[in-house]
Image (cartoon, rainbow, N blue to C red):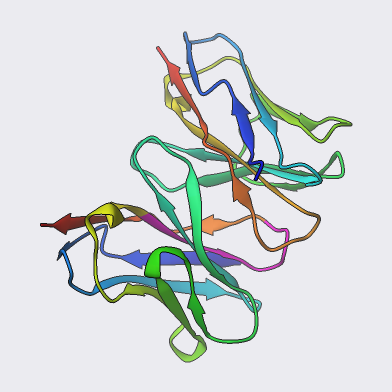
């Protein structure tokens, strides 16, 4: 079965650069969630979208923005990167208000 | 508000022994509860979930968990540990379907041969 696709899988950036992470949900899923998992930490919710509208907002820094496009894929844009942004970024998708979120493999961002 | 506490950041068991990973939750509304497993450098894989109905939930790989409202707990168990069970385990709660998940800090399970 098709799963959540995230690209790139690995990304290395320097401080103050920008990065764009992409998430392609499972076909027919219309809800996307973004999580950040720092080294040795639990995943922290950043933001979610339902039907291309922001549905919930968590601990997302102002330097980050995200959107969901007409094909339901989502992009997380990160600017003025800091060392502390180095983390594993997960995307999850669900069908509407389904209770189950399916997670992608994550994008590992390293900021040097 | 919802939150999760996982007791024990590291648990070691012998191969073939019982696995017990503890999770207590706090929720102002009836919770949806989940256990996820994460292998090194991989994403989160759903083991099992509780939404409504039967309080004993069976998941993949022989794991099960029991929702105990009176104890606000959702402990994960497996009768006999296998070497392949070594991984990081996360308990998560959400208050409403389609809402954000709140994760516990994770429990690293080591299986000793």
- Is residue B44 at all visible to an observer of this figure? yes
Q: Nearer the viewer, residue A108 or B19?
A: B19
Which contiguous range is marked in magenta? Answer: B89-99
- B13 sits left or right of A95 in the view: left
Q: Who's the residue at 71% across and 67% down the image?
A: B96
Q: Is residue A86 above or below residue A98?
A: above
Q: Position of residue B99 (x, y in %)?
A: 70, 58
The residue nearer to you, when weighing B97 against B82, is B82
Query: Quick check: A105 above or below B98?
Result: above
Q: Extreme left residue here?
A: B113
Q: Residue furthest front?
A: A1
Q: Position of residue A46 (x, y in %)?
A: 62, 41
The residue sitting at 32% across, 73% down in the picture is B78
Count of numbered marks? 0
Name the quadrant containing residue B53. Answer: bottom right
Relative to residue A5, is residue A28 depicted above or below? below
Write down the quadrant of residue B39 in the picture: top left
Residue farthest along the bottom direction in this orientation: B70
In this image, B53 relative to B78: left or right?
A: right
Magenta span contains residue B110: no
Quadrant location of the N terminus of chain B in the rendered image: bottom right
**Which residue occupies 34% across, 39% down?**
B40
B9, B12: nearer the viewer: B12
Quadrant location of the C terminus of chain B? bottom left
């Amino acid at each position: 079965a098709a799963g959540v696709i995230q690209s790139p899988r690995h990304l290395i950036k320097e401080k103050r650069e920008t990065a764009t992470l992409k998430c392609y949900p499972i076909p027919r899923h219309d809800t996307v969630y973004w999580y950040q998992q720092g080294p040795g930490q639990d995943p922290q919710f950043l933001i979610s979208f339902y039907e291309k509208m922001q549905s919930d907002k968590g601990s997302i820094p102002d330097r980050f923005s995200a959107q969901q496009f007409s094909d339901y894929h989502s992009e997380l844009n990160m600017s003025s990167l800091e060392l502390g942004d180095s983390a594993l970024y997960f995307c999850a998708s669900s069908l509407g208000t389904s209770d189950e979120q399916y997670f992608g493999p994550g994008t590992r961002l390293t900021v040097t | 508000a919802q939150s999760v506490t996982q007791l024990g950041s590291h648990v070691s068991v012998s191969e073939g022994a019982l696995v017990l990973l503890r999770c207590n939750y706090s929720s102002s509304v009836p919770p949806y509860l989940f256990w996820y497993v994460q292998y090194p450098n991989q994403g989160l894989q759903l083991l099992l979930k509780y939404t409504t109905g039967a309080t004993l939930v069976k998941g993949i790989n022989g794991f099960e968990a029991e929702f105990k409202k009176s104890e606000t707990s959702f402990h994960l168990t497996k009768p006999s540990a296998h070497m392949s069970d070594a991984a990081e385990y996360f308990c998560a709660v959400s208050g409403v379907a389609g809402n954000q998940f709140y994760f516990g800090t994770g429990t690293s399970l080591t299986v000793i041969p």
